[in-house]
């Protein structure tokens, strides 16, 4: 259903088709016996629907591209389990664009689980790829093998995916020279070197509302060491820049966060629970003072750090870095094993630090990291929070609570409702234009509203309209830069999605 008649005239709007031009069925007894056959026939706007079965990996597709108003979707058939097993890579995409990959399982590969690249030339980057509700698991390799490998990919989202059981020397998600991305509401467990690595000139990536358990040597490796031939663009003077890490829960691993040749990285409102060796590492692995900036000008604020042992040092600092330029502020540091703990070893002071005060997690033993209004972290952060929603989909107050959970939420948005209605904004961040999508299981009365960071109503896109079941999609444009919250009200159930508009 086109919603053009419901929108204010100040929005630039187009109405792409809300249903695929064709549905290509893949599987035993279907029109196409395998994915390769369907890809050979697919056109922009089509959906490739893969029915239940286990399919062989080792597939390669070059230049598989939809169009801005006619994406190609590759997904599981509704309610059916489609698994791609084995092969060097389950699937390798070279120079793809405008693809939506959802509901598929990739497992037991010997190279990388799923590989997306720009064909070796960043002059034509891969771009506009969505991975949604996919599972990448059980690598059948022990070296530098990644469950999801992305090289030269711009404008992407990885949302509500599961990434687990990686290779000992690899990453869950490995990004080389990727830009303008969102990794949101994913579950990571039992990874080797890293849960997420962003290196080789990665820039403008938001990592928010994810859960990490045993993420390897460095749960978040923000930077790294990249061969000069692999930087994208080849003029990049950092491994990673403008990476934003908001509202995540990080349990275990050697180190929760590593800043490695990274600049302008913000780590805010996260909950870090019982790292083994260090909380933070500050390193420089790509050393060339004539080209590369030294690791520095990074932020660590509004985080809860819960320790259960005496670490030799909370912060590991390597040579050729600028630790004196790091900003620490409004963090809660608690060591449950040392009642008289004197505090963390960090390179610069932490103003308004809460030292050795129990944050009062609801039940960390079952991964419930909510905090009550009586928690010392409640309302103790510096505001406003960098993101609107906490890990649990609740709105942050201003000033916010410290950590990934807001003790005094300002909205009732929640994770299950987000999943049920599939509220989606893409691209995000954006420079002004975005697509908004949601799915209704039944006929319902719907309101769709946009708020700014101060909670003020900016636009009312849909005003209590009775809409039919199915997928609804709009395209909007906003001129003013900032962070906004889109709220979808479906019969009293409220789902929220954060939208960042760049200058």
Image (tube, rainbow, N blue to C red):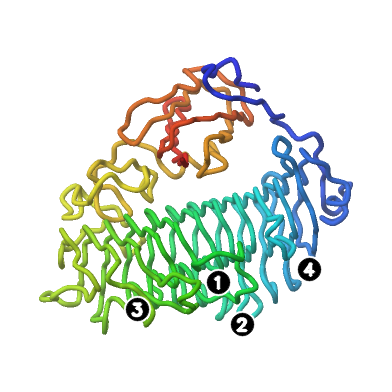
Any mark on residue 276, and which? 3
Mark-to-mark CA distance, 4 and 1: 20 Å
Label 1 sits on a secondary structure element that is strand
Q: Is residue 55 above or below residue 342?
A: above
| CA neighbours of label 2 inside 10 A, class few (<14), some (14 to 19), many (20+) | some
| Residue 414 in the image, given as x and y percentages of width and height | 40, 41
Q: Residue at x 43, y 60 (%)?
A: 211
Identify the residue under disc 4: 58
| Residue 229 in the image, given as x and y percentages of width and height | 65, 73
Q: Residue at x 85, y 50 (%)?
A: 38
Q: Quadrant of the N terminus?
A: top right
Q: Is residue 228 left or right of residue 124?
A: left
Mark-to-mark CA distance, 2 and 3: 22 Å
Label 2 sits on a secondary structure element that is loop
Examine the rendering and report whether any part of residue 175 can be seen.
yes
Identify the residue under disc 2: 143
Q: Nearer the viewer, mark 4 or mark 1?
A: 1
Mark-to-mark CA distance, 4 and 2: 18 Å
Identify the mark nearer the N-term, 2 or 3: 2
Any mark on residue 171, and which? 1
| Residue 369 in the image, given as x and y percentages of width and height | 31, 57
Identify the mark nearer the N-term, 4 or 3: 4
Q: Residue at x 43, y 37 (%)?
A: 481
Identify the mark nearer the N-term, 4 or 2: 4
């Amino acid at each position: 259903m086109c919603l053009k008649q419901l929108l204010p005239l100040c929005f630039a709007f187009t109405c792409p088709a809300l249903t695929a031009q064709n549905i290509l069925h893949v599987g035993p007894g279907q029109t196409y016996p395998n994915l390769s056959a369907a890809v050979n026939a697919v056109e922009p706007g089509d959906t490739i629907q893969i029915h239940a079965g286990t399919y062989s990996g080792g597939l390669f597709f070059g230049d598989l591209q939809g169009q801005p108003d006619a994406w190609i979707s590759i997904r599981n058939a509704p309610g059916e389990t489609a698994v791609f097993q084995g092969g060097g890579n389950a699937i390798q995409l070279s120079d793809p664009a405008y693809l939506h990959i959802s509901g598929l399982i990739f497992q037991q590969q010997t190279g990388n689980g799923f590989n997306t690249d720009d064909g070796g030339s960043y002059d034509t980057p891969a771009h506009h790829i969505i991975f949604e509700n996919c599972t990448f698991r059980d690598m059948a390799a022990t070296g530098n093998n990644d469950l999801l490998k992305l090289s030269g990919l711009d404008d992407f989202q990885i949302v509500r995916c599961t990434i687990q059981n990686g290779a000992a020397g690899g990453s869950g998600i490995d990004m080389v020279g990727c830009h303008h991305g969102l990794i949101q509401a994913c579950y990571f467990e039992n990874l080797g070197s890293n849960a997420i690595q962003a290196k080789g000139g990665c820039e403008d990536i938001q990592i928010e509302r994810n859960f990490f358990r045993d993420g390897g040597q460095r749960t978040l490796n923000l930077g790294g060491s990249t061969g000069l031939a692999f930087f994208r663009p080849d003029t990049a003077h950092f491994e990673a820049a403008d990476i934003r890490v908001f509202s995540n829960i990080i349990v275990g691993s050697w180190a929760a966060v590593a800043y490695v040749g990274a600049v302008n990285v913000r780590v805010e409102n996260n909950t870090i629970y019982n790292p083994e060796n260090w909380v933070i590492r500050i390193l420089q692995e790509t050393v060339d003072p004539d080209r590369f900036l030294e690791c520095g000008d990074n932020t660590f604020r509004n985080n809860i750090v819960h320790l259960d042992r005496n670490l030799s040092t909370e912060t590991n600092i390597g040579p050729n870095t600028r630790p004196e330029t790091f900003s620490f502020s409004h963090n809660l540091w608690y060591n449950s094993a040392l009642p008289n703990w004197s505090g963390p070893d960090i390179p610069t002071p932490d103003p308004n630090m809460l030292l050795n005060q129990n944050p009062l997690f609801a039940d960390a033993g079952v991964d419930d990291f909510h905090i009550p209004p009586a928690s010392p972290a409640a309302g103790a952060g510096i505001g406003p929070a960098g993101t609107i929603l906490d890990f649990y989909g609740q709105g942050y107050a201003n000033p916010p609570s410290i950590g990934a959970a807001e003790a005094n939420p300002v909205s009732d948005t929640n994770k299950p409702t987000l999943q049920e209605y599939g509220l989606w904004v893409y691209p995000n961040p954006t420079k002004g234009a975005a697509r908004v999508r949601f799915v209704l299981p039944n006929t319902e009365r719907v309101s769709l509203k946009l708020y700014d960071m101060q909670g003020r109503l900016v636009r009312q896109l849909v005003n209590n309209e009775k809409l039919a079941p199915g997928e609804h999609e709009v395209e909007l444009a906003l001129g003013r830069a900032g962070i906004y919250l889109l709220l979808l009200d479906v019969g009293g159930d409220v789902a929220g999605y954060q939208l960042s508009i760049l200058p």
